[in-house]
Amino acid sequence: MNKKYHVKLNELERKAILEEMEKSETPKTIRKRSNILLQVDETLGKPATQEEISKRCGVSDVTVYQTVKDYDTQGLTYVLRRREHEQPPRKRIVTGEKEARIVALACGEAPNGYAKWSIRLLRDKVVELQIVDAICPETIRTTLKKHN
């Protein structure tokens, strides 16, 4: 079967990949892509199949294919870049003023019949006061934890 994309690393590229993998702050995804490139390199002999490499690296066959394709068409710097989203996947429910109101509510007096605020009690009160339409207890907990 004819391969459409090929990886032939030169010494500088191989050295750059190894240096990137040695850094402690390198993200896991870049480490995996680096490992894929080293295993697919054709200058060291016949590489293993995509299925074997995907099992060794703990990624899917598609990831191996895309990494090889990106290297062949875009180059090494493109493959080893950190991909960042322009916007986060989801907008935050609690920001700024809402966060301050939740913290102020939690710092205030507990309702009659309760010794202190519970997270579920806070959640119900936040919805009752229409600070937000709906909120889960985990969001309340992380908001309070952030403000100690």
Image (cartoon, grey):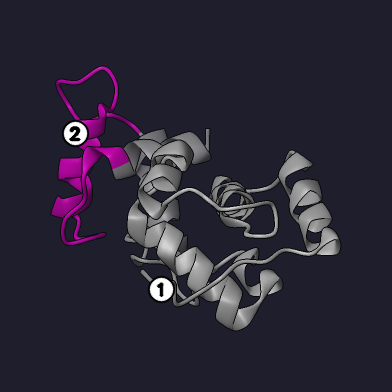
Compared with 31, 42 (above or below) is below
- Whether residue 119 is in magenta: the answer is yes
Residue 145 image position (x, y, % from top left):
46, 34
Mark 1 vs mark 2: which is more N-terminal?
A: 1
Residue beneath disc 2:
121
Observer-nearest of 31 and 49: 49
- Indicate the amino acid at tag 1: Asn
Does residue 104 appear in the picture of this structure?
Answer: no
Observer-nearest of 67 and 50: 50
Which residue is pictured at 63% across the width and 57% down the height? 41
Which residue is pictured at 61% across the width and 66% down the height? 7
Which range of residues does the magenta coloring cover? 109-138
Question: Under tag 1, what secondary structure?
Answer: loop
Does residue 129 appear in the picture of this structure?
Answer: yes
Q: Could you say which disc has been placed on residue 2 in the image? A: 1
Which residue is pictured at 61% across the width and 64% down the height? 82
Q: Residue placed farthest to the top in the image?
A: 115
